[in-house]
């Protein structure tokens, strides 16, 4: 669809951030990136908090929002749902299919993402190694990948057709090594990563780099 005025994407290239960039690319919407350097505290600045009061990326502002009026949206899952409704893409209107998409979208929002974030912290970034925490989140990620692998055993995508559920999960699952996993243990997830990762819009959304 034609976007009269570009969406502003408040962005840093994290597994949550790329959900929004992939979706914008997949939908073919015009957008501009406002870089929020979370390593330097940009997410705590008042101008960003006005858009995202939880001081987390991504967020968007759409000047062509509902009724032709501007709207700001924070939380990656809400952004995916909004853009899906706006464009009619990757978020089915039929209720049964929508329920299926939402189950796996919220599975990511409530499980894969938060547990993956904790795994990243304790396995890669924590200055103090805490074996209990390392084991806990490594094991929980193994459980989640097992669930995902079973789901993908008889279908190409999480909700049947490619959808915002796949977009939500891709950035997190592509960092399986950060989460203490061996992708060979999950052949269906590996095939799904290859399948989704081959999409040109996914590649563009994943490869945003700040100029300079």
Image (cartoon, grey):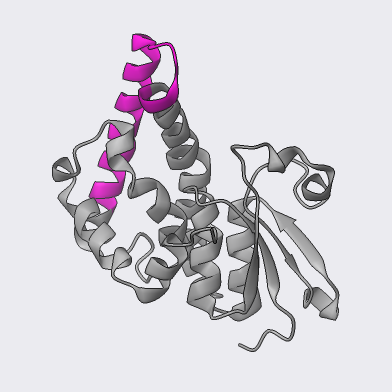
Residue in the picture at 79% in, 45% down: 49
Residue 143, quarter of the rendered image: top left
Residue in the picture at 13% in, 44% down: 184
Stretch of the chain drawn in magenta: 123-151
Is residue 95 visible to the viewer in this orientation of the structure? no
Viewer-proximal residue, 108 or 184? 184
Residue 64, quarter of the rendered image: bottom right
210 in relation to 25, above or below: above
Residue 127 included in the magenta stretch of the image: yes
Image-based side of 128 in relation to 196, left or right: right
Q: Residue furthest bottom?
A: 2
101 in relation to 116, above or below: below
Q: Position of residue 126 (x, y in %)?
A: 44, 19
Residue 126 included in the magenta stretch of the image: yes
72 in relation to 56, above or below: below
Viewer-proximal residue, 206 or 143? 206
Our reading of the magenta stretch's main secondary structure is helix
Viewer-proximal residue, 45 or 131? 45
Q: Position of residue 140 (x, y in %)?
A: 35, 28
Q: Position of residue 98 (x, y in %)?
A: 52, 66
């Amino acid at each position: 669809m034609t976007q009269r005025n570009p969406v502003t994407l408040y962005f840093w290239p994290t597994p949550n951030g790329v959900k929004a960039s992939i979706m914008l690319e997949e939908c073919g919407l015009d957008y501009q990136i406002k870089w929020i350097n979370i390593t330097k505290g940009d997410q705590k600045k008042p101008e960003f908090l006005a858009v995202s009061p939880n001081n987390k990326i991504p967020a968007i502002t759409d000047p062509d929002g509902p009724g032709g009026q501007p709207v700001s949206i924070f939380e990656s899952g809400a952004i995916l749902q909004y853009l899906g409704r706006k464009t009619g893409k990757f978020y089915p209107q039929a209720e049964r299919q929508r329920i299926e998409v939402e189950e796996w979208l919220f599975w990511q929002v409530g499980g894969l993402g938060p547990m993956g974030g904790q795994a990243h912290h304790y396995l890669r970034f924590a200055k103090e190694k805490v074996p209990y925490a390392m084991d806990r989140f490594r094991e929980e990620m193994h459980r989640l990948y097992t669930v995902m692998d079973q789901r993908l055993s008889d279908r190409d995508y999480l909700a049947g057709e490619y959808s915002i559920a796949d977009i939500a999960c891709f950035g997190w699952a592509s960092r399986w090594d950060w989460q203490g996993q061996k992708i060979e243990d999950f052949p269906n997830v590996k095939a799904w990563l290859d399948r989704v990762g081959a999409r040109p819009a996914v590649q563009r959304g994943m490869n945003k780099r700040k100029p300079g």
